[in-house]
């Protein structure tokens, strides 16, 4: 099943956990707010199978639920 993700940056508290758990997938802006690196947080690029393991770690441990997931691309603005 395809898996897409993006960070709800309003909900991110800049704790750094997702980047520690999945450094290939998450990056930060100057304020420490996270984003999904492979698609610039647009939620438009499906995760590769190998990336799903690290993604699930970050997804389940994010303290605020800011990391969103979907089986479809997120709507583009
Ligand atoms: S784990 Fe969640 S709250 Fe922490 S930086 Fe990542 S997205 Fe933000």
Image (cartoon, helix red, strand yellow):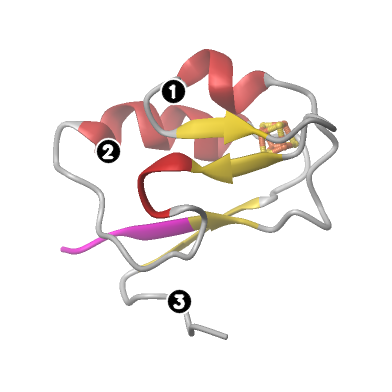
State the image quarter where residue 46 is shown.
bottom left
Total marks placed: 3
Q: Residue 21 or 37: which is nearer the viewer?
A: 37
Q: Which is closer to the viewer, label 2 or label 1?
A: 1
- 43 drawn magenta: no
Whichever of labels 2 and 1 marks the residue nearer the N terminus, that label is 1
Q: Quadrant of the N terminus?
A: bottom left
The residue to which callout 2 is attached is: 52
As drawn, the label of residue 74 is: 3
| Residue drawn at x 52%, y 40% as measured from the top left | 59
Q: Quadrant of the C terminus?
A: bottom right
Q: Is residue 76 left or right of residue 31?
A: left
Q: Earlier in the sequence, mark 1 or mark 3?
A: 1
Is the residue marked by circle 3 packed among few (<14), some (14-19), or many (20+) residues within 10 Å?
A: some
Disc 1 and disc 3 in contact, CB within 8 angstroms: no
- Distance in Å between CA atoms under marks 1 and 3: 21 Å
Estimate the x, y position of residue 9 in percent, counting from the top left. 75, 54
Left or right of 44, for residue 51 = left
Residue at screen point 48% across, 65% down: 42
Q: Secondary structure at mark 3?
A: loop
Above/below status of 72 relative to 70: below
> Which labelled disc corresponds to residue 22?
1
Magenta stretch bounds: 1-5
- Front position among marks 3 and 2: 3
- The secondary element bearing badge 1 is classed as loop
Ranked by sequence position, the earlier of labels 3 and 2 is: 2
* Crowdedness near tag 1: few (<14), some (14–19) or many (≥20) residues, C-alpha within 10 Å: some
């Amino acid at each position: 099943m395809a898996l897409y993700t993006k960070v709800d940056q309003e909900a991110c508290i800049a704790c750094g956990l997702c980047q520690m758990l999945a450094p290939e997938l998450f990056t930060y802006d100057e304020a420490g707010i996270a984003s999904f690196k492979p698609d610039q947080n647009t939620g438009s690029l499906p995760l590769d199978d190998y990336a799903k393991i690290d993604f699930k770690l970050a997804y389940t441990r994010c303290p605020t639920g800011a990391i969103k997931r979907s089986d479809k691309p997120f709507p583009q603005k």
